[in-house]
Amino acid sequence: MPYVNEKNLTDVVLERWKSIPDPRLKQIMQSLIKHLHGFVRDIEPTEAEWATAIDFLTRLGQKSDDKRQEVILFSDVMGVSMLVDAINHRLDSGATPTTVEGPFHIPNSPEVANGGDMAKGAPGIPCFVSGTVRDLDGRPVAGAKLDLWQTDGEGLYEAQRDVAEPWMRGLFHSKADGSYSVRTVAPIGYSIPMDGPVGDLFRHTEISEMRPAHIHFCIEAPGYHRVVTHLFQRGCPYIETDVVYGVKAPLIVDFVEHPPGIAPNGEKVDTKFYTVKYDFVLQPKAQAAAAA
């Protein structure tokens, strides 16, 4: 084995890490070593700077728990989550675009009846979201599961609230004609969590830490490509500078304001409220595989 020096070290490490039977793992590790060594050679960190980097990565893990994922947040703000999403969801142009899941999704949300209230007294302006789930040919998709989660009207997710029960999330299902209906409250633009290592990093920049107002959706139906996406409020001041790069033009929708009166589901609402209409278009799995 050759003794290492600055010039040959990368080649020596690459040669050692050829000893991997799994071809995919071998490809990943060879590429990681090349790019990581290239990064270090490019910036030439001091030992103190490298220790700071290791400490940052350590604190990312320490800040993560079953309700908050600081590592995902770091991936999001680096644009990596959106790049991975784009690579894995090369869908037909007529299908609803995907975007990042984000760090605040919590599985096993409660079932809510069609038209039911997901907010259940949470602060915010009442908002009624409705539309259909259909396929690329316009046929309704019955029984599609719509998993929703979002901030309340104060910009907080469940993980940021001291609550024992599910908060601002629920599972809905499309009806036989593909229609769905949700009562919630309007989300607002909000800052990513700034009390962790990602926030510490952002305080050294002039990058906006804000996300535009949006509602998260995960739509699943047998035989169709799973879609994780958002609906963004048109006119939100953070649309152009979304900190996680998640905005796509087809996902920007009108939140139509109404005076107090009768809501789309027949309820009498004593305050102003919003309505949102959006049709989700799912792509069959066979077509999704062909597009890839």
Image (tube, helix red, strand yellow):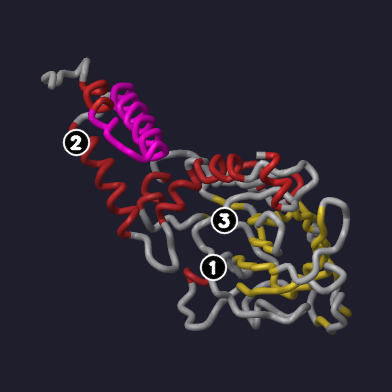
Q: Earlier in the sequence, mark 2 or mark 3?
A: 2
Residue 176, located in which quarter of the rendered image? bottom right
Residue 63 location in percent, x, y? 34, 60
User: At x 63% / y 49%, what residue is drawn?
Assistant: 99
**Front-most of residues 129 and 205:** 129
Residue found farthest to the top: 7
What is the C-alpha distance between the residues marked 1 and 3?
14 Å
Mark 2 touching mark 3, by CB under 8 A? no
Q: Classify the position of the C terminus by image quarter.
A: top right
In the displayed structure, 253 sits above or below 206; it is: below
Earlier sequence position, callout 1 versus callout 3: 3
| 29 magenta-colored | yes
In the visual, does 9 lie left or right of 265? left
Residue matched to label 2? 48
Residue at the spot of label 3: 101
Q: What residue range appears in magenta?
A: 16-43
Task: Classify mark 1: helix, strand or loop.
Answer: loop
On screen, residue 41 above or below 222: above
Three-letter code, disc 1: Tyr
Q: Nearer the viewer, mark 2 or mark 3?
A: 3
Q: Residue at x 21, y 22 (%)?
A: 9
The image shows residue 6 at horizontal and vertical percentages of 19, 18
| Residue shown at the point (57%, 76%) measured from the top left | 167
* Side (left or right) of 15 relative to 273: left
Q: In whole angstroms, how far apart are the C-alphas of marks 2 and 1?
A: 36 Å
The secondary structure that dominates the magenta segment is helix
**In the structure shown, which secondary structural element does the residue marked by tag 3 occupy?**
loop
Q: Is residue 178 left or right of residue 38?
A: right
At label 3, the amino acid type is Glu
Q: Residue at x 63, y 53 (%)?
A: 212
**Residue marked by disc 1:** 157
